[in-house]
Image (cartoon, helix red, strand yellow):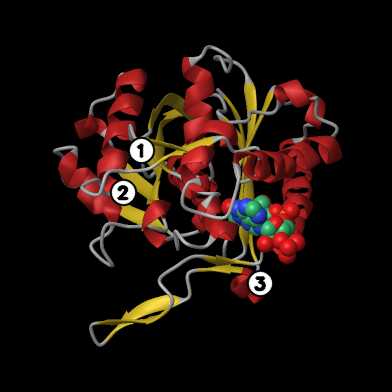
Amino acid sequence: MTHSRIVGTGGYLPPRVVTNDDLAKRLDTSDAWIRERTGIAQRHIADESQTTSDLALEASRRALEAAGVRAAELDLIVLATSTPDYVFPSSACLLQAKLGVKGCPAFDVQAVCSGFVYALATADSFIRSGAYRRALVVGAEVFSRILDWNDRSTCVLFGDGAGAVVLAAGERPGIHASVLHADGSHANILAVPGNICGGRIEGSPYLQMQGSQVFKFAVRVLDEVARETLAAAGMTIGDVDWLVAHQANARILDATAKKLGLPPERMVVTVSHHGNTSAASVPLALDECVRAGRIRAGHRVLMEGVGGGFTWGAVLATL
Ligand code: UT7
């Protein structure tokens, strides 16, 4: 039986760092409030000239190099984003061209902050089916472009970045199990409720969020889907070396680890210095830990996403 395995990771953060104190100079907020309520100290913001596919390209190059795979050897490119370069073509197609290759299928996945987990589960299914042998799976975002920078309740939370993994066919898992969910009846609590119609933006082009409702929803489903995924793999939380959950708020991460009975030192926290980078948060956190030598070959990692839609899901993998 064919399995899929993560054989390389990469990440990219734009160089410009914006601290809480920088935000407090122009907004009615403070470093103390942001740290206490979210755990965030700083975020990276893309230069005006940088698009999602540019960020994705840097992360992808690093993941390909780590995997020892050439772009020409890829059979599939799946890119998760809610901030694509254009309405169309997809950012995955633009990334493919920037990588200098053509022919393999390339498409975007839109599942907001669950996007990377959705994209990884999708690529895993293609590989397990035997259709493809090497996939590039990317999460990349420029959320700074869809924030109202005068709305202190949302703009302090997010940042820009990209993360990528190369997934390859192999004899051993690799990915043990994945579980995805959605419930569109909660669409209104986290949305950018605008579209382009007749050449004009209709509705709002900015992110709107009912923060406390999102918080409660996230804590509940991150616990539920972790248990579901572990059960599907015939494992328990004791079999997990690292929890790499979507990085939205340190309090959500703490509550999730507590509910799951996971020791806090096995939970990865990057929201402090990345902010919430939506679909990029999980692969960025994974890559940071791999490069720091914390997550190593043979470690078992539970990756989880939750976000607008609502969407949520988890992937359990041995590296
Ligand atoms: O990727 C998935 C999507 N995002 C999330 O998962 C985020 C989920 N939600 C959260 O992380 C939290 O709900 C927030 C961090 C967004 C807010 O924390 P909270 O503890 O739920 O605060 P709150 O919304 O209940 O607001 C408390 C107070 C309010 O003032 P009043 O009405 O009590 O006078 C807000 O106006 O804090 C105020 N506030 C701020 N104060 C200083 C809201 N934002 C700020 C701010 N600085 N940036």
Which label lies toward us, 1 or 2?
A: 2
Q: How many marks?
A: 3
Are dots 3 and 2 in contact, CB under 8 Å?
no
The spot of residue 127 in percent (x, y) is 44, 40
Asked if residue 310 is positioned above or below residue 37 in the image, the reply reads below
Mark 2 residue type: Thr
Q: Residues within 10 Å of mark 3 (few under 14, many from 20)?
A: some
Are dots 3 and 1 in contact, CB under 8 Å?
no
Q: Specify whether tag 2 is near ligand 1 (CB below 8 Å).
A: no
- In this rendering, position of residue 46 left or right of residue 111: left
Instruction: Identify the image quadrant of residue 176.
Output: top right
The spot of residue 269 in percent (x, y) is 63, 30
Q: Residue at x 19, y 33 (%)?
A: 72
Nearer to me, 231 or 92: 92
CA gap between label 1 and label 2 equals 15 Å
Q: Which mark is residue 193?
A: none
Which label lies toward us, 3 or 1?
A: 3
Say whether disc 1 or disc 2 marks the residue closer to the N-terminus: 2
Quadrant containing ligand 1 reads: bottom right
**Residue at disc 1, secondary structure:** strand
- In this rendering, position of residue 120 left or right of residue 215: left
Q: Which residue is mark 2?
A: 52
- In this rendering, position of residue 200 left or right of residue 44: left
Mark 1 residue type: Leu
CA gap between label 3 and label 1 equals 31 Å
The spot of residue 105 in percent (x, y) is 27, 51
Mark 3 residue type: His
Q: Residues within 10 Å of mark 1 (few under 14, many from 20)?
A: many
Q: Residue at x 25, y 88 (%)?
A: 198
Asked if residue 73 is positioned above or below residue 78 in the image, the reply reads above
Q: Which residue is mark 3?
A: 186
Asked if residue 312 is positioned above or below residue 292 in the image, the reply reads below
